[in-house]
Amino acid sequence: MAGNQPTPMQTDIDESLYSRQLYVLGHDAMRRMAESNLLLVGCKGLGIEIAKNLALAGIKSLTLHDPNPIDIADLSSQFYFTEADVGKNRAEVSCLCLRDLNQYVAIEVNNAPLTHDLLKQFQVVVLPDAPMKTCLDINDFCHAGGVRFLSCQSRGVFGNIFADFGEGFVVHDTNGEPCLSAMISSVTQESPGMVTTLDEVRHGLESGDFVTFTEVQGMTELNNCPPMEIKVTGPYTFTISDTTKMSQYKSGGYVKQVKVPIKVDFKSLRDSIADPEYTISDFAKMDRMPQLLLGFQAIDAFMEQHGHLPLPGNAEHGKQVVAIARELNSKSKEMVDDIDEKLLRQMASNARGDLSPMAAVLGGIAAQEVLKACSGKFSPIKQWFFYDCTEALPDEELPPSEYELKGTRYDGQIAVFGKNVHERIMSSKYFLVGAGAIGCEMLKNWALMGLGCGPGGCVHLTDMDTIEKSNLNRQFLFRPTDIQKLKATTAADAVTRMNPALNVKCYSTRVGPDTEDLFDDDFFEGLDGVCNALDNVQARLYMDQRCVYYQRPLLESGTLGTKGNVQVVVPQVTESYGSSRDPPEKSIPICTLKNFPNAIEHTIQWARDDFEGVFKQSQDDINSYLTMPDYLTTLKKQPGTALTTLEALKENLVTKKPTSFSDCVVWARLRFEELFHNQIKQLLFNFPLDMVTSTGTPFWSAPKRPPAPAVFDADNAMHLDFVTSAANLRAFNYGIAGSRDPAVLKAAIADVMVPEFTPQKGVKIQVTEGEAAEAAASAGGDMDDDYMRRIVGELPTPATLGAFRSAPIEFEKDDDDNFHMDYITACSNLRASNYAIDPSDRHQTKLIAGKIIPAIATTTAMVTGFVCFELYKLTQSKKLEAYKNAFANLALPFCSFSEPVAAPSRKYRDIEWTLWSRIDIDEGDLSLEKFLEVFQKRYELEVSMISCGVSILYSAFMTSKKKLEERLPMKMSELACSIAKMELTPKQKYLIFEVCATDADDEDIETPYVRFKFR
């Protein structure tokens, strides 16, 4: 038995480690998790997936129980076992590896008998791949004793999860979505009262939600009322309780959604078998769930009778499982009307299957359910969840010889797909783009599947990033000692320890047009497929274009907190990733951002923009002025920004250039005055609080919030935070040592002379987007050239400043000591206080300002499992209907699978073509004249125009006869170089041309692009 390991006390949450997960679960749920002790019974592939995800998530302790020795077959899905470990205890070996994942989680082994005294020590007990009899016995005790219980099984392409969290289980937040809010335009006095919100944005609420109110004028009884249940009547309306006895509504107010805890009752496993409830995993297979429950029971019964599981491809064993299922069905009040014999025979044949993708899918989902049991965050599975991927099985029935098991680490995969498919996987060549969270999980799956482990097989891996501490929470191949190392090489080293046969070739290079000399024609033509593990749309679109061009399948996936999606792109069959786009993000109107914020998101974006302008852009301008001889000449060509840039240069190099930290403090204190006092007073001077519009309505009515200027107070923590962070950032720009000492800062602040501010007449402040657009269009139109020349004359010449250079600041959200987030948080909250907007803590500000994508390991594991099942199908060249795009949300929980959209086709005569089609011309480096002849002979089309990139190489309407005569005899590659300015690399073989053509009736005909092989 392994003893307790010493672990640091997790008195508070390590935000630098858990930052991305905190945005999924929140602090309260994480604290509840950090107080939970869990028992995991079974350490094979499915068990280790669950354990890995729980360790990364940050529970208090995890106790492993598995007295069995390691078998070579366990290596099919258990990534911590090696061939050298065969014969050792499963739990002991697993424990040593799991401890490296998270220093805050105590992990130990207890292989003592599973007595009631042992079980009651834990909040949650998890049984992966345990026999049904064991599950029933343990669940009986857990259900009666208030211990939350979860079991799951993986059998080839079939899997199940069962959850029992007892009676009265409290769910604190059903979906994890941020609470919604909306501005109110009216509330009626009736029963029920009708609330109408401003019609700028739909309120997004649903019937059954609970809300409260703030800042309502007139009907003040609503303000800070206990949560009220609503009924939605329209996108901008909903009803609440009786408002007839409340005061009459006058104006204003906000409605805010409130999360109200709910209680959920669970049945025991024994009762749930007799009367099952299902969480649907695939709406196309809803009728399968009772069949699958029956099938899993029949396989367990077969094993209990024979002492072993059915053999793969064994027809007799399949018949016996079907017979057992019939008997069980007859004893259970006809669980199903008709036995699906084919499905049950498939389940019997898969019984010995052990696939890493299935372990990843079930392990991700099951681990999230365990976290729900610990935290009450998100809706749990009620109570059975079944998943199958029979579409991935071979289309034809295979002979028993295909399933012959030879005592290797791949037996669990051969038992499902046969030797032929397995050998194809072994010899596959895939390009994995990205070694982050998805990349790490994918590499692990591929190593266990044997992808790239056979003759000719290879995994190409690229990622240019280095490892950061925040990566360790979900990128499980990395350890604290790997921080600042390259992700690609570190991941490759880790995964080859899992399977030394894996052939990985690493690159630390970005994919893009600038690296096409490395990832060239030969590279892509040698691949069997590409798998994206990227976190930005631009790179995804580029890889999608590459895959379409080279006719290679693409496996695309992504996660956002508990949400995950998978798209499979099949050459000549489906649409591509770029065929559909998400709508663009909504931007904040300029006027709202600059003068009329009404939400914390507005003030955070304003603060982020201010940071960029003051500490980055203006400092870049200094260095450009000092290093570019023609900088001022270039600046004059930018009338919209020239004047403000010159004024900033004068301030930064002359009037307010600091020479000491005290100077930086003075600058920061005056900047506070300008931003949070003077600008607000000017705004109120232009638009007084009692101002009315031409229609007679108050100017300061929703969505505008009336502001109030701030009065500086050195004893106000927020005020001092702003000056501290601003002064230190300013000091960094100028290479001056900063200070955090409040005494030093307050002493310098006390000496600052703050001039009295008097609002000025004639200052224009834009109120509408139209006014803002007009002002931007006319910017610089009335520039005072004499004034600008005077500023230039006051600037020191670069020579007089010698070697001085400013240090522009690149925003870095994850360094807690660099003052970046301190400044943005203080700046945002000060502006929020100007407008009486609720402030945001540093954690939430960081999410918005840093555009952080929330992430958790459970979703990543599940998504990569889905991806690998699509890879199995690609290896077998399945038909369209076999492939499945996926979307899942573990918080609800919800899964949806859909057939990929077929590639739309177009037709000319008998020729049908899609986005995958192209015209290949491989007749040497033809002249333009010969190229036109080939097109005419092959397709009976008259070429009217040929373009390469943005340049036109040929047009039938060329006005210059001489130019046409010059080009006709030229080689196509010469034309591309001389006219399109293409730079051909030594290994480049193809050129791409777009062709416009007409038919015999002079009708324009749309054609695919031309891939022209010139060497």
Image (tube, grey):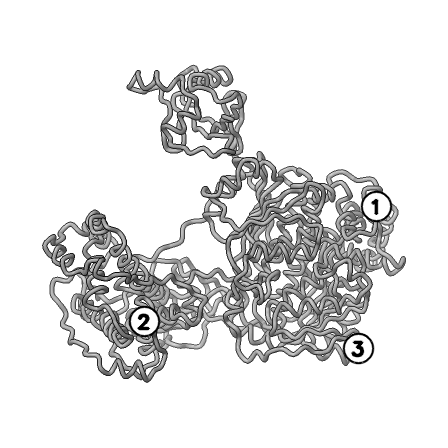
Decide which of 538, 381 is in the foreground and name it.
Answer: 538
Which residue sits furthest right?
A: 306
Decide which of 715, 963 is in the foreground and name it.
Answer: 963
In the picture, measured across the screen, residue 444 lies left or right of residue 777, that is right
Residue with the mark numbered 2: 736
Instruction: Sort mark 3 into few (<14), some (14-19) or many (20+) by Cα contacts within 10 Å.
Output: few
- Amino acid type of the residue that numbered disc 1 sits on in the rendered structure: Glu
Q: Position of residue 410 (x, y in %)?
A: 76, 50
Q: Toward which corner of the image does residue 564 lie, by quadrant? A: bottom right
Q: Toward which corner of the image does residue 661 lie, by quadrant? A: bottom left
In contact (CB < 8 Å): disc 1 and disc 3:
no
Mark 2 to mark 1 CA distance (whole Å): 73 Å
Residue depicted at 21% across the width and 61% down the height: 800
- Amino acid type of the residue that numbered disc 2 sits on in the rendered structure: Ile
In the picture, measured across the screen, residue 721 lies left or right of residue 544, that is left
Say above or below: 508 vs 476.
above
Q: Position of residue 528 (x, y in %)?
A: 62, 40
